[in-house]
């Protein structure tokens, strides 16, 4: 027997010398290039070439090899078994995987079966398959997320009835939320191009242990593409391009990656041009003129037109086009076998983006604004990250991230009948430092302690000026005069500082159960100063507010059998008022927000349960997540006496004063039901439905940002190189009685009018009509390097608006995209 074993070992070693293997896609049998192959100790690694081939002769006989690629399910196999498979490895699409590895829950890799929180993972494969125009459109197709749009160039994600500064946006471990992230609708999610993303994870609920303040509704974590180290010099690139008929969109992105043993680089550029968006013509809701654009403004910064112009195509939403460019540059430098240093540069910039709802606002039967646009939205991110893997008693692995962000935005407006134009500019500079570490308390890694810190400093600049146009015919020759204008935020020195420490303990007490217990301490300091008192006079022109809180989470994931998982979560969240909350001054539909320097933090206390059932072959999954969230001291807009008055003169017009104030208690309850099934190797179906309800305990008026029932269903059929898909999306009606009127966030005035004579808005408007849309898609893999995708969105050309949106959704749209690897 020993002799027989020696002979087999000799044969295995002989086969291993110069052993060439090939990695293929399971469905199409096409070769897969750039697959990372490494052993368990990570002492050796190779990549497959353009033919999917790699030489594994440097690995030893007993190695377990891992095969990793962003678009496929990671696979592990004993090296001895490869010869038995004719030296071929078959990888399955990541979209077919029901149990993903997630990163956002603890800022490190965690199996989904060990996590009790509700998490949605959007892989690179899904991103390419959906081919969204913006990252906001990508989120809108994700179960449990509703996206509001004020204009074409935007998108405000709603998670569990929480929106804007109650939802935390993160990119590559750096929080995007800053001191002027506002309450209401926030359009910043588009400043990360979907064409440069490797994956996106959405963590639902107040997960304040890892992410802290702002994450009351949840966390949207964007992960951009990363370079990889290679055993030999390797240059690869990819090109993506898309055309869409609905707004004559043209988008293109190019990614180039250069890899060596000592360093690696990834460069990405994405450019998009969007023209005016057309709405659907099929008005199955029965409102013949709802959303139509009979008149529009042709005014620009250089062209003057005294009156609105008649629209030759009322279904075309004029002034909704814009352009955007995104740049990504990353470097990866291994300092040692246990340490890596990476650098991350991101730049996003747009052209002027018209605010469509403002340009479509009427006053006494005529359009109110000749101009209302956001200046170019600029975002710069510079960060460096030190990844550590010392594997010591006090730290197994960790990462330290230092980041600098520079964000610029502006608001510019002028009314018809006036030559006075108002310019308001904001600039936020953010410096942040994060540390996240993990240590295994036992050799079998059943007890893991995570700990870390976060600190950031926001410096806010806010300026404003008014200028009178000098007009000659239709030409604007410049400005004839200047006048004082109130800035949106404090025009003196303003800052917002945050410091936090956290710790989390994970205990796998058995193969069936995982307990997570964590706590976080957060301290914030806000300083604001108003220098100009000629327009707004406050009781205190300089304010300093310090707040702190301890939040916690207890969660338990239990698998009574291999096919069932039961999840329970108890957590608390905390959001300290920022500069926007306490110091914003702006007008909307006759109401002007004024500062409230007495504003206090708001808190969230969350309880949720989750049930997941898998079929015995892991090809079918059904899940239900339900939650109850108590909001305490919650912040809401309300009518507010300013210096004893309820009206002030703002931008030349008398307006009613409102402000953010602390209320009592409110609740949000909801659930998401989801289903996935791989019926066979060709057919996959999935569906989801989300229900949300939110009301205060001290008022009969519902909370803002609570979407109606919505969901989706889809089926995908794959046959060799072809992929076919049918998707269905639905949205229930939201009645006027379910709207929050006083805050103005739900935008009931954007819904159909049913009684023009009514004074009460609940009697005047219909609310949001229900709608349904269908989408057809197909994908063809021309070869191992080139994929062509075609989508027919909104097949029935249905007219509808997403809840609280100021712009009608796209009508029937045909898009075609090509993705090529070189």
Image (cartoon, helix red, strand yellow):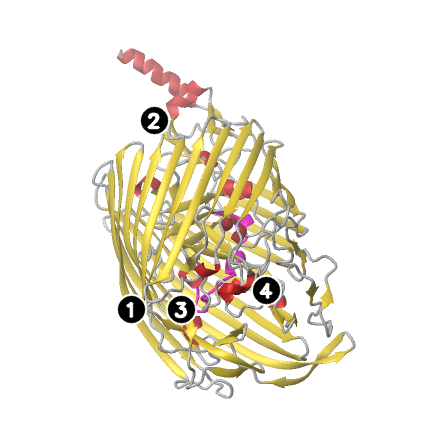
Foreground pick, 523 / 551: 551
Q: Which residue is mark 2?
A: 62
Residue ID at (47%, 30%): 91
Mark 1 or 3: the one toward you: 3
Disc 2: CA contacts within 10 A as few (<14), some (14-19) or many (>=20) = few
The foreground one among 208 and 459 is 208
Asked if the magenta segment contains residue 196, the reply would be yes
CB contact under 8 Å: marks 1 and 3: no
Specify the quadrant of the image occupied by residue 497: bottom left
In the rendered structure, which disc, 1 or 4, sits on the residue that comes first in sequence?
4
The reply to whether residue 335 is in sight is: yes
Distance of label 1 from label 2 (alpha carbons): 54 Å
Q: Quadrant of the C terminus?
A: top right
Measuring from the top left, give residue 740's x and y in whole percent: 44, 64
Judging by the rendered image, the residue that carries numbered circle 4 is 357
Which x, y percent locates residue 775?
58, 41
The magenta region covers 175-199
Q: Which residue is mark 3?
A: 636
Whichever of labels 1 and 3 marks the residue nearer the N terminus, that label is 1
């Amino acid at each position: 027997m020993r002799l027989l074993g020696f002979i087999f070992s000799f044969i295995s070693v002989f086969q291993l010398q110069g052993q060439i293997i090939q990695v293929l896609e399971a469905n199409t049998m096409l070769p897969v290039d750039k697959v990372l192959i490494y052993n368990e100790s990570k002492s050796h690694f190779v990549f497959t070439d353009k033919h999917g081939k790699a030489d594994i002769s440097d690995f030893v006989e007993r190695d377990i090899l891992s095969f990793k690629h962003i678009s496929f399910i990671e696979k592990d196999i004993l090296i001895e078994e490869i010869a038995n498979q004719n030296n071929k490895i078959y990888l399955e699409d990541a979209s077919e995987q029901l149990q993903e590895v997630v990163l956002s829950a603890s800022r490190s890799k965690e199996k989904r079966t060990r996590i009790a929180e509700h998490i949605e993972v959007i892989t690179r494969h899904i991103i390419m398959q959906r081919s969204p125009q913006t990252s906001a459109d990508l989120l809108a197709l994700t179960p449990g997320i509703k996206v509001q749009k004020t204009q074409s160039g935007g998108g405000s994600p709603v998670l569990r009835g929480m929106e804007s500064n109650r939802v935390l946006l993160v990119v590559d471990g750096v929080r995007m939320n800053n001191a002027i992230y506002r309450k209401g609708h926030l359009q910043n999610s588009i400043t990360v191009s979907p064409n440069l993303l490797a994956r996106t994870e959405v963590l639902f609920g107040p997960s304040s242990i890892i992410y802290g303040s702002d994450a009351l509704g949840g966390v949207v974590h964007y992960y951009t593409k990363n370079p990889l180290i290679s055993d030999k010099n390797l240059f690869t690139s990819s090109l993506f391009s898309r055309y869409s008929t609905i707004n004559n969109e043209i988008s293109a992105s190019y990614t180039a990656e250069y890899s060596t043993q000592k360093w690696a680089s990834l460069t990405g550029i994405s450019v998009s041009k969007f023209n005016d968006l057309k709405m659907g013509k099929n008005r199955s809701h029965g409102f013949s003129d709802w959303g139509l654009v009979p008149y529009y403004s042709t005014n620009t910064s250089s062209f003057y037109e005294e009156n609105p112009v008649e629209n030759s195509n009322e279904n075309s939403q004029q002034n909704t086009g814009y352009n955007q460019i995104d740049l990504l540059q990353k470097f990866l430098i291994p300092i040692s076998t246990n340490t890596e240093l990476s650098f991350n540069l991101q730049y996003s910039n747009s052209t002027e983006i018209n605010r469509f709802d403002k340009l479509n606002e009427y006053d006494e039967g005529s359009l109110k604004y000749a101009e209302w646009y956001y200046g170019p939205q600029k975002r710069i991110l510079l960060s460096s990250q030190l990844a550590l893997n010392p594997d010591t008693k006090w730290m197994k692995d960790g990462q330290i991230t230092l980041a600098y962000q520079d964000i610029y935005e502006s608001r510019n407006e002028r009314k018809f009948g006036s030559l006075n134009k108002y310019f308001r500019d904001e600039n936020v500079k953010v410096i942040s430092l994060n540390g996240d570490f993990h240590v295994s308390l036992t050799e079998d890694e059943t007890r893991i302690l995570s700990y870390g810190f976060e600190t950031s400093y926001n410096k806010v600049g806010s300026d404003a000026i008014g200028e009178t146009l000098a007009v000659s015919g239709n030409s604007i020759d410049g400005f004839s005069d200047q006048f004082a204008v109130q800035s949106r935020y404090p025009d003196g020195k303003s800052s917002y500082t945050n410091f936090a420490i956290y710790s989390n303990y994970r205990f796998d007490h058995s193969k069936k159960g995982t307990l997570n217990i964590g706590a976080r301490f957060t301290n914030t300091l806000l300083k604001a100063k108003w220098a100009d008192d000629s327009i707004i006079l406050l009781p205190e022109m300089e304010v300093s507010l310090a707040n702190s809180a301890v939040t916690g989470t207890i969660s338990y994931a239990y698998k009574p059998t291999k096919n069932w998982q039961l999840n329970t979560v108890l957590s608390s969240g905390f959001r300290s008022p920022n500069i926007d909350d306490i110091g914003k001054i702006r007008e909307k539909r006759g109401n002007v927000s004024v500062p409230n320097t007495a504003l206090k933090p708001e808190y969230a206390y969350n309880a949720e349960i989750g049930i997941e059932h898998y079929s015995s072959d892991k090809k079918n999954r059904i899940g239900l997540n339900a939650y109850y969230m108590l909001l305490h001291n919650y912040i809401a807009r309300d009518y507010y006496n300013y210096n004893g008055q309820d009206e002030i003169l703002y931008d030349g017009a008398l307006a009613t004063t409102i402000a953010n104030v602390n209320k009592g208690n409110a609740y949000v309850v909801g659930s998401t039901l989801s289903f996935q099934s791989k019926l066979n190797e060709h057919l996959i179906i999935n569906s989801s439905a989300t229900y949300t309800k939110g009301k205060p305990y001290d008022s009969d008026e519902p909370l803002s940002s609570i979407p109606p029932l919505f969901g989706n269903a889809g089926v995908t059929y794959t046959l060799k190189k072809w992929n076919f898909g049918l998707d269905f999306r639905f949205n229930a009606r939201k009645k006027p009685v379910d709207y929050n009127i006083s805050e103005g966030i739900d935008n009931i005035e954007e819904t159909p009018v049913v009684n023009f004579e009514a004074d009460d808005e609940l009697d005047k408007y219909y609310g949001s009509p229900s709608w349904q849309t269908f989408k057809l898609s197909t994908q063809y893999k021309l070869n191992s390097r080139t994929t062509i995708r075609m989508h027919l969105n909104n097949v029935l050309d249905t007219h509808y608006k997403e809840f609280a949106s100021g712009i009608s959704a796209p009508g029937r749209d045909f898009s075609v995209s090509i993705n090529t690897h070189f």
